[in-house]
Image (cartoon, rainbow, N blue to C red):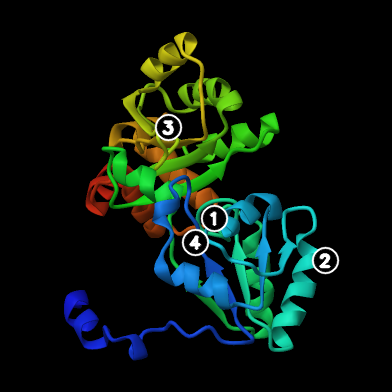
Amino acid sequence: MSYIKDFDKTYTPDKQKNAVLGGVLYLVGTPIGNLSDISERALKVLSEVDFIAAEDTRNSGKLLSYFDIKKPMVSYFEHNKRERGEMIVSRIEAGESCALITDAGMPAISDPGEDIVRICAERGVPVSVVPGPCAAVSALAMSGLFTGKFVFEGFLSTAKNERREALESLQNERRTIIFYEAPHKLRGTLADLMKAFGNRKISLCRELTKLNEEVLRMTLSEAIAYYEENQPRGEYVLVLEGASKEEQKANAFWAEMDEFAHVAYYTEKGLSKNDAIKAAAKDRGVGKSEIYNIVMKK
């Protein structure tokens, strides 16, 4: 697809999706630190909707005031999302337009806004997106690590067992992994990552788009040593290198099994001998014939 060609065909104001319509929920991305990153379309939508749902009306009030936008606001956050979400959707169903914003970045991404989008989807209420800054994608782009495939984990649980289980489930993940973390929890999180993943590469991105923007590219052991001497400051996006093929094999459930035990594992799960051989070969990254010749030899 040629995006430039398509853009040339449609780039006239009357053909752009710029009209603000009643009965629609607008997801509006807002700056993550630099007010200059607000888009023209975001300002238009915020200025023309009937009301704005905000995670923190005080924070969002400052943003709207800066751009001289005066619109009624309702609070919508984690602890009132079910009750308030029903009320907001009912107003939209009655014909009003609403812009949903979060404290910074894209609403509904690691954010209670996902719940109201789900309600809209269930009830056939139109949802439109006004793209804007996203800390996770911005950090990934700056990380210097592989960006072709990635997974976003957001904030790790503070419950020890849940955190441990989440990290263990990611040990064999080949894709780049993205976490969010607060400064007062950073040192503990780095120690947990080191324990779970070993000494992988990590990019620590903080205060993105702000005056003190900083990206540190190092190994986990270097990061731990660095923050023993330096106080973590600002909100962090942690971009962690995915598992190598060697790590993946070392951490696999079958790492200590020989080919006979590996095939037996799958036959005990109910697979036929042929399918078990095929599954073991896939795990080990070898041809089916290689496993067949070992386990079927006399």
State how far apart marks 4 and 3 are (Cα).
Answer: 39 Å
Q: Nearer the viewer, residue 247 or 235?
A: 235
The image shows residue 76 at horizontal and vertical percentages of 72, 60
CA–CA distance in space, label 4 to label 1: 16 Å
Could you say which quadrant of the image residue 23 lies in? bottom right
Asked whether the viewer can see residue 175, the reply is no
Q: Looking at the figure, which quarter contains the N terminus?
A: bottom left
Q: Which tag is nearer the camera, tag 1 or tag 2?
A: 1
Quickly name the residue at label 1: 66
- Secondary structure under the numbered disc 2 in the rendered image: helix
User: For residue 49, what is the image quadrant?
Assistant: bottom right
Q: Earlier in the sequence, mark 4 or mark 3?
A: 4
At 43% across and 55% down in the image, what residue appears?
Answer: 133
Instruction: Work out how far the residue at label 3 is from the one at label 2, CA to CA, in angstroms.
Output: 44 Å
Q: Mark 4 points at which residue?
A: 29
Give the mark nearer the N terminus: 1 vs 2: 1
Three-letter amino acid code at the position of disc 3: Asn
Indicate the quadrant containing the C terminus: top left, top right, bottom left or bottom right. top left
- 294 in relation to 46, above or below: above
Q: Distance between the residues labelled 4 and 2?
A: 23 Å
Q: Is residue 18 above or below residue 165?
A: below
Residue type at mark 1: give it: Tyr
Dot 3: element: helix
Q: Pointer 2: what residue? A: 83
Pick whichever, 66 or 287, lies toward us.
Answer: 66
Q: Residue furthest front?
A: 68
Q: Can residue 124 be seen in this view?
A: yes
**Which residue in the rendered view is the most extreme toward the top?**
229
Point out the tag, 4 or 2, that comes first from the N-terminus. Answer: 4
Q: Which residue is drawn at 52% across and 66% down?
A: 28
Residue on which the image places disc 3:
251
